[in-house]
Image (cartoon, grey):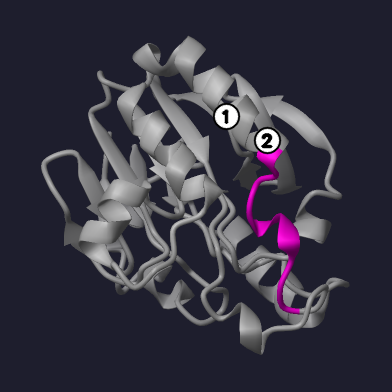
Amino acid sequence: MIYITGDTHLPIDISKLNTTNFPEQKNMTKNDYVIVLGDFGLIWKNEPDNEEKYWTKWLNEKPFTTLFLDGNHENHDRLNSYSVITKFGGNVHQISNSIFHLMRNNIFDIEGKNFYVCGGAKSIDKIYRKEGISWWSSELPTYKECLEIVDFIKENGRKVDYVLSHCLPTFYQRMLASWYETDDLTNVLDIVDEETPNKIAWYSGHYHVNQDIDKKHFVLYDDIVRLI
């Protein structure tokens, strides 16, 4: 089984994954997955603290395996300090025994479906944050990384079943939240959308709403959706 949900901002919005709000987990095992669409928030402080250790243990003791893509509100420096391993056919950071970061611009084979993952987003509250403490410039890909995304998706896009991102492509972001600024990533995601014509669905977080934009593009926050 694969379930998917929006931002958890650990610990602010993690209650959606307790047994009261998510009773389906009682029938899950470590071979089943919950995917968080960015702004996971577990890796936040520059050094692990007791709160991080508590929530890591809490998630490890869940019956499912937790997967997440990065959003904008992550400590990207610490996240990227983890060793890269191969899992599901792509590059991941292993955070703990059953918590894995799905790295950007990878296709992962999970439960027989191909998931293209591209995390990251622009913080609209950057002005209120401090670099290296509560904001990190690598929340957005560099120009070179954007070119790599375009090259990769043009070569591999037709085999993608699902697209998972934190922010939306520019076209859909303007439909949902026109006050959000476009950037290189949202523009590149427009190309990803064009180059994945066979996708079943595209899921994003970031906007703190649950909304079906059309029959293939969805935004999640508190809702938990079963894919497989």
59 up-or-down from 204: above or below: below
Let me know if residue 139 is in the magenta part.
Answer: yes
55 up-or-down from 227: above or below: below
Q: Which mark is residue 145?
A: 2
Range of magenta residues: 134-143
Pick the residue in front: 104 or 4.
Answer: 104
Residue 35 seen from this side: yes
Which residue lies most toward the left here?
215
Task: Characterize the local packing of mark 1: few (<14), some (14-19) or many (20 or more) Cα atoms within 10 angstroms.
Answer: many
- Please tell me whether the stretch drawn in magenta is mainly helix, strand or loop: loop
Q: Quarter of the image holding residue 112? A: top left
Pick the residue in front: 193 or 211.
Answer: 193
Q: At x 65% / y 46%, what residue is drawn?
A: 141
Let me know if residue 95 is in the magenta part.
Answer: no
Amino acid type, mark 2: Glu
Q: At x 37% / y 46%, what residue is drawn?
A: 169
Task: Characterize the local packing of mark 2: few (<14), some (14-19) or many (20 or more) Cα atoms within 10 angstroms.
Answer: some
